[in-house]
Image (cartoon, rainbow, N blue to C red):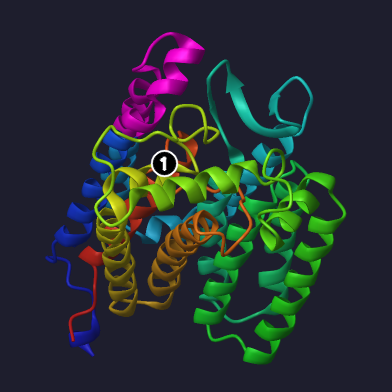
Amino acid sequence: MRKFLPSQSSRIDRLLLLAVLLLVGFGVAMVFDASVADATRTFNDKFFFVKRQMVWVGLGIASMVVTSFVNYKFWEKVSVPFFGVTILLLIIVLIPGIGVSALGASRRIGIGVWGIQPAEIAKLSLVVFLSASLSRGISLIRFLVPVALVSFLIVIEPDLGTTTIVVATAFAVFFASGAPLAQIGLLGLSGFLTALVLAITSQYRRERLLTFINPNADPVNSSYHIKQILIALGSGGLWGLGIGQSRQKYLYIPEPATDSIFAIIAEELGFAGAAVLILVFLFVILRGFKIALSAPDQFARLLAIGMISWFAIQTLVNLAAMVALLPLTGIPLPLVSYGGSSLLVTFAAMGILLNISKHRATM
């Protein structure tokens, strides 16, 4: 049995670390590129967004270093209080005067332009909680109660996009725990129908759904965003217009440095550059699943699968929305898009993966 015990002398997965840093470095450069026009017009400072992004990157790298050194078993011990604090934050963000509202949603706790999004923290804490709970035994109640609670609190912000990521990631952990396929299928169908009802009962979400079904329905209003994204993708061709040469970033695409940054990348670097970026994402995902497969115990395996599934699902949802295969959801591209809480929490998740890679079982 000793050959299956964790190898304490193992080093972190350097290839995963390198790929993560490559994505982040590229992301910082593209955030500056994509945000120049918006930053100049809004703040009279073309470096406004990239300066803040670099602060978040610094904090994120620090969080990754810390979580890569903290033994993954620590997260099993703190899973309950961590989850409890997250629920408290998700409630606090809904309180008028505390939660910062924008575009009709209360998603942030903070002052001015700085703040944290509890929904982003929920992605991490729910994976930790489910991994700890389900590693002790498969239970439908252990799965349903925390997922339903987190989903409810996020969807009433309202943030259906993040709710979708959270629920899909939870299903990945439930599946990996060995849950019966019949249960997964029934719950998946219920989740899909619930999301559909939420989409058609909200005017804003209904417009996005109708725009997805027919992108040409209202090119001036509801279809404007996706039309401008598709123009950017088409303009890039095979090799792109060149670094810094995007036309769509000049206030045609709303907030081009956030969830739509892939459109600017494809416009400037073309299909070839976009394909290389996707390959780097694919490499990170494959390394993550490789770490999960060699994890030393059930908790580590579920934790690794949860972390990398969340990363993979969020990447897929963002890219699919950019090419009109899914409705636009406002979900950022991990490690590349501009954003604070999302970047910070993703770094922490990568650090946990790196720590698990140090304890991989030797076969």
The quadrant in which the C terminus is found is bottom left
* Rendered view: 336 above or below 310: above
* Rendered view: 303 above or below 204: below
Tell me where residue 319 appears, x and y as whole percent. Answer: 46, 58
**Residue 175 falls in image quadrant:** bottom right
Q: What element carries label 1?
A: loop
Left or right for 310, reference 198: left
**Residue 185 falls in image quadrant:** bottom right
Q: Check the image and name the residue furthest to the top.
A: 44
Tell me where residue 19 appears, x and y as whole percent. Answer: 22, 55
Residue under the image location 33 percent in, 48 percent down: 67
- The residue carrying mark 1 is 337
Is there any visible trace of residue 344 in the rendered image? yes
* Rendered view: 267 above or below 151: above
Left or right for 300, reference 313: left
Tell me where residue 277 appears, x and y as whole percent. Answer: 28, 56
Tell me where residue 256 appears, x and y as whole percent. Answer: 47, 35
- Front-most of residues 132 and 29: 29
The quadrant in which the N terminus is found is bottom left
Give amino acid for label 1: Ser
Residue under the image location 57 percent in, 47 percent down: 227
Left or right for 144, reference 329: right
Q: Check the image and name the residue furthest to the right.
A: 201
Q: What stretch is highlighted in magenta?
A: 31-59
Residue under the image location 76 percent in, 32 percent down: 104
Q: Is residue 57 in the magenta section?
A: yes
Q: Is residue 307 in the magenta section?
A: no
- The majority secondary structure of the magenta stretch comes to helix
